[in-house]
Amino acid sequence: MIRTIVLTNPGGETLALDLFEPWKTGIAVKNVDGLGPGKADINTTDLALTDSALFNGSRVQKRTISLTLVPMETITQDVEQSRQKIYRFCQIKQPVRVTVYADHRQVYTDGYVESSEPDIWSNLESHKISILCPYGYWYDNRGDASDLIHFDVEEPSFEFSWEDPLPDSPTLEFSRTLSDKTAVANYEGDVEAGFLLRIKILKANPLPITLTETVWQQTMKLTGKWTPSAMAYQPSVGDTIEVDTRIGQKGIYLEKPNGKRYKGMHFLDFNSDWLLMHPGRNEFHCFMSDNTAVDIRFTTDITYQGV
């Protein structure tokens, strides 16, 4: 059940609209549209003299959130002051963050106020607000939602049974040694999402580095060569290669120990995939000549289709 909707204006001020106690703010929420999964565009091609069509691709449209609010009279403010409070937090054409608190999810999305239309002359005054959100999904708003995941050479595990009928095959297993750097992540989101990968250089000549996701069969290779015939550029010890595969933020950067950042698309092999996190189990393997040459970790945002 949805309990609270919070609006954050460009100045960082927040307006918490409690669905059960609207007297706290003097603004009641009458109706909200646009909280569920958005609409998708399915691109197909019709062929002459052939039944049906061929699937080309698909995309999710931008999200439109429509709020119908009712300004109320309270002990400290009248209806007009409540209406003006809505103006303050939903400024036309300005950005606004919409955060929704439900029983099992806390999510947010960023948008822009498309329209703000008060119905001043009706017996029960209302205010309709339309917010256009370029990104069609919701981000998890929990403090621990951005998971920090390490590549390691051991996968932790634990199995327990009251008896073990085969002494040469114990069921009590605390960890499993792996032949390469591996990260296993159980992604809780509804939709695939990119992530931010940071590779700290610990030894000289660490490239090439190959990252493979075995469940969805994706591969990204960092070689330092823009073309196969070019000479490889090796980062220095202490440098950090940052790979960002998030939608709208894709890029590769080289960060020096002094904090200076440079574009680093030349590190990416021409035939590489932009790795993504998919719902459920994701298993990433990192292959290189020396497993101790780098320290790899990444963070990912959890995204949902709807509240």
Image (tube, grey):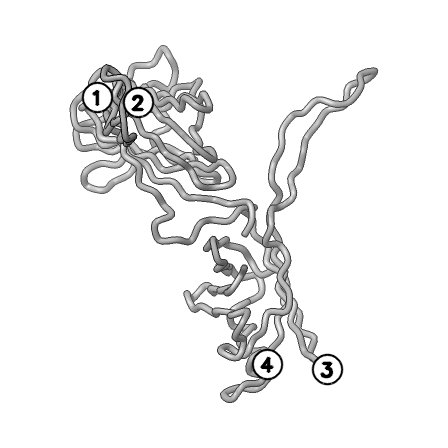
Distance in Å between CA atoms under marks 3 and 4? 12 Å
Q: Earlier in the sequence, mark 4 or mark 2?
A: 4
Check disc 2 and report the residue beneath it: 286
Mark 3 residue type: Asn
Q: Is residue 205 left or right of residue 44?
A: left
Q: Earlier in the sequence, mark 3 or mark 1?
A: 3
Name above or below for residue 127 compared with residue 248: below
Q: Is tag 1's residue or tag 2's residue first in the polypeptide sequence? A: 2
The residue that disc 1 covers is 291
Q: Residues within 10 Å of mark 3 (few under 14, many from 20)?
A: few
Q: Which mark is residue 123?
A: 3
Q: Which mark is residue 72?
A: 4
Q: CA distance from mark 1 to mark 2?
A: 8 Å
Asked whether the beta carbons under mark 3 and mark 1 sit within 8 Å of each other, the answer is: no
Disc 1 is placed on an element classified as loop
Outermost residue on the bottom side: it is 75
How far is the residue under mark 4 from the one under mark 1?
A: 64 Å
Q: Amino acid at mark 2?
A: Cys
